[in-house]
Image (cartoon, grey):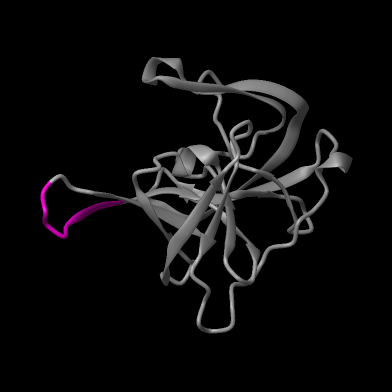
C-alpha cells in the first residue's frame, strides 16, 4: 500500500500536488491501514491509498499516535469484497540474527520494493527526524536491522520469515 499526499494549491484550480510519500500495510479487510505518523503528519493534506494493483482509495480518517511514530488510516471500503489483511506476529520473541524482510516504496519511486536482512539489535533508542528541519522525536525499544531501508519505505512492514508483521519501517541512521 502506498500513499499520495495531496495538498490543494493556493489557486482555485482543480490541480493538486500528488506524490508517493510512504508505505503502509492492511490491518483489516474493511480498510484499516497502518503507517508511520510522519508519513501522514500534514493535517491539511488529504491522502489516498494506492494498492499493489494501482487501485486508489480515499483516506476518510487519520488517527495519529502522539507518542509513537504510528498512524492508522481508515479508507473507503473496497467494493470487491475488502482488502487482504496481513498477519501480525509477535516481536517479543525476536532474537539478534533472525532473518527479516522489509517492504516499501524505496525513494518514493520504486513500488513494492523488498529487501532482506537480519535483526542487528533489539531495544535500541533513536532520534528520528531532523532538528534542522524543525522536527525530531525520540523512539525507544526499536528493532535495528541491516535490511536496506530508504526514504519512502517508512510505514511499510518489517516481516519475520513466516511473513508476519513484527515491526514497521521507521527511520534510517544517516551515519550508517
Magenta-drawn stretch, dominant element (helix, strand or loop): loop
Residue at 54% across, 30% down: 172
Can you tell which quarter of the image residue 107 is in?
top left
Q: Is the residue 135 above or below the residue 34 in the image?
A: above
- Of residue 51 and residue 57, the one placed in the foreground of this image is 57
The residue depicted at 76 percent of the width and 45 percent of the height is 99
Image-based side of 121 in relation to 114, left or right: right
Looking at the image, residue 62 lies above or below residue 120: below
Give the image location of residue 56, x and y in percent: 40, 68
User: For this rendering, which residue is in front, 143 or 33?
Assistant: 33
The stretch of residues the image draws in magenta is 11-18
In the visual, does 8 lie left or right of 95?
Answer: left
Task: Reply yes or no: does residue 115 show up in magenta.
Answer: no
Q: How many marks?
A: 0
**Between 164 and 79, which is closer to the camera in this rendering?**
79
- Identify the residue shown where x is 63% and y is 34%: 68
Answer with left or right where residue 146 lies relative to residue 120.
left
Amino acid at each position: 500500500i502506498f500513499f499520495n499526499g495531496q495538498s490543494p494549491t493556493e489557486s482555485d484550480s482543480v490541480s493538486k500536488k500528488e506524490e508517493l510519500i510512504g508505505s503502509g500495510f492492511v490491518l483489516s479487510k474493511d480498510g484499516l491501514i497502518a503507517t508511520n505518523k510522519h508519513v501522514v503528519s500534514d493535517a491539511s493534506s488529504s491522502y489516498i491509498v494506492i494498492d499493489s494493483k494501482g487501485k486508489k482509495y480515499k483516506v476518510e480518517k487519520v488517527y495519529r499516535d502522539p507518542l509513537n511514530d504510528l498512524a492508522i488510516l481508515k479508507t473507503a471500503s473496497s467494493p470487491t469484497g475488502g482488502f487482504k489483511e496481513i498477519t501480525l506476529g509477535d516481536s517479543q520473541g525476536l532474537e539478534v540474527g533472525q532473518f527479516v524482510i522489509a517492504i516499501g516504496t524505496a525513494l518514493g519511486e520504486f513500488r513494492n520494493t523488498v529487501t532482506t536482512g537480519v535483526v542487528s539489535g533489539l531495544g535500541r533508542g533513536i532520534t528520528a527526524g531532523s532538528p534542522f528541519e524543525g522536527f525530531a522525536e525520540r523512539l525507544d525499544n526499536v528493532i535495528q536491522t541491516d535490511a536496506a531501508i530508504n526514504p519512502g519505505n517508512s510505514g511499510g512492514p518489517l516481516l519475520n520469515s513466516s511473513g508476519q508483521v513484527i515491526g514497521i519501517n521507521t527511520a534510517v541512521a544517516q551515519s550508517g
